[in-house]
Image (cartoon, helix red, strand yellow):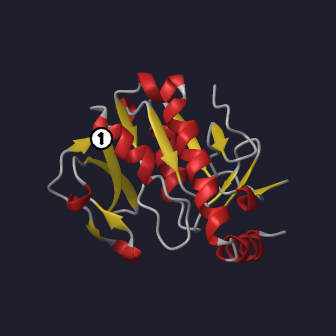
Amino acid sequence: MDKPTLRTHVRSLRAALRPLVRAQEEELVNAAVVSDEVWAAADVVAVYKAVGDELSVVSATNHALRTGKRVCFPRVAPGDQLVLHEVTDWAQLEPGQFGVPEPPESAPVVSPATVDVCLVPGVAFSERGDRLGQGKGYYDRLLPTLGGTSWGAAFSCQVVDAVPTEPHDRPVDVVVWPGNLELT
């Protein structure tokens, strides 16, 4: 499948998830993240606020906030770059580009090189980590600058045999989904 067709297909599968399945899979993924030794040892984590029917990482984010980790969210900056900003409370997020909640520009900037774990959204993933995003390449530009590891967070229906890739596409290190809950 080409990228647009795969996006449409997986989005329809994700939208059709029954609420109980959605809740169970989110719980499994978040529990796997917070129980992993790499996450436990992390000082700085990058997360995202789910939009629409994306997999929510609120539980893992709340865990990070409660345990004193530096938590950062991406903000779209000029030049179509994601800049990471530290957030200490969900109330700091505000609607940004495309309606995606993001930190205010005034929030402290965090260097991607200091990030120990980055949770990454996506439309589809292959088991080996190839990622299909929304199509703007924001995470493809961010991932190579990270100092730590990147984990794609996905529902089972988002993991496919193959994701079409181009030279600019960057994979995540691990895909966390109900079929793969062992990260390290």
Which image quarter is the C terminus in? top right
| Coordinates of residue 93 in the picture (x, y in percent) | 26, 62
| Coordinates of residue 94 in the picture (x, y in percent) | 25, 68
Q: Is residue 5 left or right of residue 147?
A: right
How many numbered marks have been drawn onto this rendered protein structure? 1
Tell me if residue 97 comes above or below residue 110 in the rendering.
below
Q: Is residue 126 left or right of residue 84?
A: right
* Residue at the farthest front position: 20
**Snapshot quadrant of residue 109:** top left
Q: Residue at x 65, y 76 (%)?
A: 15
| Coordinates of residue 69 in the picture (x, y in percent) | 31, 33
Tell me if residue 74 comes above or below residue 70 in the rendering.
below
Tell me if residue 121 comes above or below residue 52 in the rendering.
above
Q: Residue at x 31, y 71 (%)?
A: 96
Which image quarter is the N terminus in? bottom right
Q: Is residue 2 visible?
A: yes
Nearest to the observer: residue 135 or residue 56: 56
* Residue at the farthest left position: 106
Q: Is residue 30 left or right of residue 5?
A: left
- Secondary structure beneath disc 1? helix
Amino acid type shown at disc 1 = Leu
Tell me if residue 177 comes above or below residue 106 in the rendering.
above
Q: Residue at x 48, y 58 (%)?
A: 138
Mark 1 burial class by Cα count in 10 Å: few <14, some 14-19, many 20+: some
Q: Residue at x 67, y 63 (%)?
A: 21
Q: Is residue 123 visible?
A: no
| Coordinates of residue 142 in the picture (x, y in percent) | 46, 47
For disc 1, the marked residue is 65
